[in-house]
Amino acid sequence: MQTAPAAIPPNSPPAAIMRHDLSPAQKLYLWLTCISAACLLIGDIVGIKLFQIPLGFTVPVPWSDTPISAIEHTCGMLTFPVTFLITDLINEYYGKLAARRVAYIGLAMALFVFCVINIAQAMPYLPAAYNVTESNFNAIFASAKGMYVASMFAYIIGQLSDIAIFGLLKRATRGKAIWLRATGSTVISQLIDSFVVSFIAFYLWRKLFPDPANAPAPFSDILKIATTGYALKFVIAIALTPLIYAGHTFMERVFGLHPLPAELKS
């Protein structure tokens, strides 16, 4: 027996303007995208500061007479490993195209923030005692432009490399050895990321836009910054391996997601 269609409640909104609820998987994708973009933006902003961690020993290098005695890199690397972790999880459960979409969204947000920073610098200054001095404001954001641009280039190159290598390793291992594709893709892509950001920020940008206060760094120093920074990123990538497995467990048990087959390329 055919049942009559359910009655439409009075004053109900037309179907065209009814709300569209997100599925749990879509909500998770949204959260992962936002966290990834936030990590990129904060990394770009704090990346102007370099840190130094003494090793307690020295490591001789072929390109310089001065051995490496400390790890030196930008503070932007504090959050960048998180973006690679998120990219690997998205690549695993949502596919390569979804992972690329997150990378492009992050790049677009970084470009938007870069434009806002430049507009803020150009705004007329209020000479008041309670206002930040214009010199202090420009000392941070003007000098950060080279690092910011370098971080954006390194981010998109590193992310796209990570996505491609992750898929290659997944197909090569037929979906097995999660640690290999996750850690392996991150270790290789962050090597590219470290050298791109160091070269652009400390040499190329300063060559293109000369500033007496920020001379281009010698190539040996660039190699030192990139190498020691990558060494720390390598250790962090290895240390984050358990989080990959924890992320798999969380996404499967809480959201009911399953990894995409290794043969699926998109």
Image (cartoon, rainbow, N blue to C red):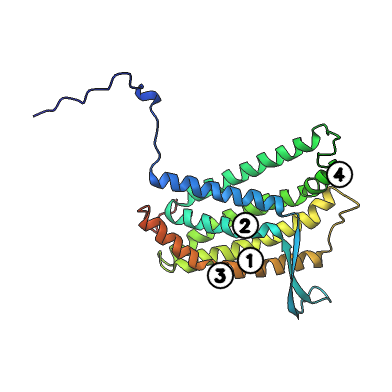
**Residue under numbered circle 2:** 80
The disc label shown at residue 135, or none:
4
**Residue 83 percent across, percent down from the top left:** 57, 55
For discs 4 and 3, the disc positioned in front in the rendered view: 4
* Disc with the residue nearer the chain's start (2 vs 4): 2
The residue at 45%/60% (across/down) is: 247
Asked whether the beta carbons under mark 3 and mark 2 sit within 8 Å of each other, the answer is: no
Q: Is residue 168 left or right of residue 228?
A: left
**Image location of residue 212, percent across then percent down:** 91, 52
Q: Horizontally, is 206 left or right of 53 in the view?
A: right
Where 228 falls versus 144 (above or below)? Answer: below
* SS at mark 4 in the image: helix
Tag 4: residue type?
Ser
Mark positioned earlier in the residue sequence (3 or 1): 1
Q: Are marks 2 and 1 in contact (CB under 8 Å)?
A: yes
Q: Which amino acid is tagged 2?
A: Phe
**Which residue has dot 1 on it?**
233
Q: Position of residue 156 (x, y in %)?
A: 62, 51
At horizontal 40% and vertical 40% (from top left) the residue drawn is 22
Label disc, if present, on residue 238 of the rendered structure: 3
**Residue at mark 4 to residue at mark 3: CA–CA distance:** 41 Å
Mark 1, secondary structure of its residue? helix
Q: Which of 231 and 174 is in front in this view?
A: 231
User: Could you tell me if residue 260 is visible in this image?
Assistant: no
**Disc 3 element:** helix
